[in-house]
Amino acid sequence: MAPKSLCQLGVLLFQLLVLPVYSQFYFIVPPPPGTNNTLDLNPWYDTGQDLNITWNGTPTDYISIAIHQRCPTRDKAEFILKNASGLTHFPWTITTKKNLTESHVFYPDIYPGENPRSTASSRWFNLSVPSTSSAIPSPTATFSGGSSSSSGLLEPTQTAIPTKPDSSSAGSNSLDTGAKVALGLGIPLAVTVGALAGILIARRFRKKKVIGNSVIGYRVPIDKSNRQMAGPAELENTARKLEPVEMPTDNH
């Protein structure tokens, strides 16, 4: 009789002291189970996505979190956090060893302390593998640490998709660059050629001027006196004057 009474007393103490502490645990992200818990309200997450799992409760010495896959047969728990102390959140990069073709519906459990049974579960959530493309990567949802919805879910934000530059625009840019290079080289070259041509023309003109001055004759000085130059002297007529001579007449 005594052992039975002691067993009942132990169960009573466990219910009074231990269960109130454990009952304070509940999930925030993913959200806790709803009243109806319909599948259409379950959140969707992608593998490889960062999810900050958050819960409320009194931190204990150790806490573990495991995820379960919804299968016809009970599956084994896959622990994503084991024996961590004093935590109320856990940043998880979503990954699983489970086969998503069998089921993509999961839920996490909290195991506080050394308790082998879970004390809190969240709403079901869906896992999917993001589609990939060899040409352009598909947009993926990323989570920022500060924004959250009223239900506690972090709101995804779309990241920008890098696009390949158009070949036509690249060609026009290359032409513009070539034109700029040609213009940058042509202007200094034209200025240099013009300067050399100007120097050669100036030297040629100066040389002609020197040659012209060297062939100019000696300038005759002007006599500033009023004296007139004497004209040529008249030669004295020294010719003998011939007198007329009468020729004798023949009286025959």
Image (tube, rainbow, N blue to C red):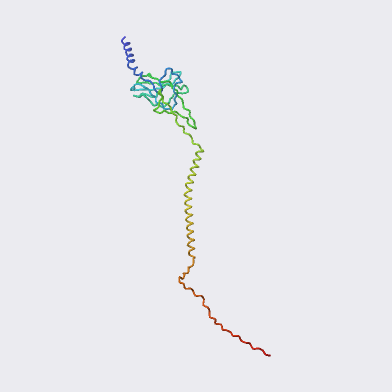
Taking the view exactly as shown, the residue that stands out farthest to the bottom is 252
Foreground residue among 194 and 233: 233
Asked whether, in this view, residue 89 is left or right of residue 168, the answer is left
Taking the view exactly as shown, the residue that stands out farthest to the top is 1
Across and down, in percent, residue 231 comes to 51, 75
Taking the view exactly as shown, the residue that stands out farthest to the right is 252
Across and down, in percent, residue 67 comes to 41, 22
Q: Is residue 163 above or below residue 54?
A: below
Asked whether, in this view, residue 6 is left or right of residue 30, the answer is left
- Please identify the quadrant where the N terminus is shown: top left
Across and down, in percent, residue 63 comes to 36, 22
Across and down, in percent, residue 121 comes to 40, 20
Foreground residue among 48 and 138: 138
Count the labels in the image: 0
Foreground residue among 247 and 216: 247
- Please identify the quadrant where the C terminus is shown: bottom right
Taking the view exactly as shown, the residue that stands out farthest to the front is 226
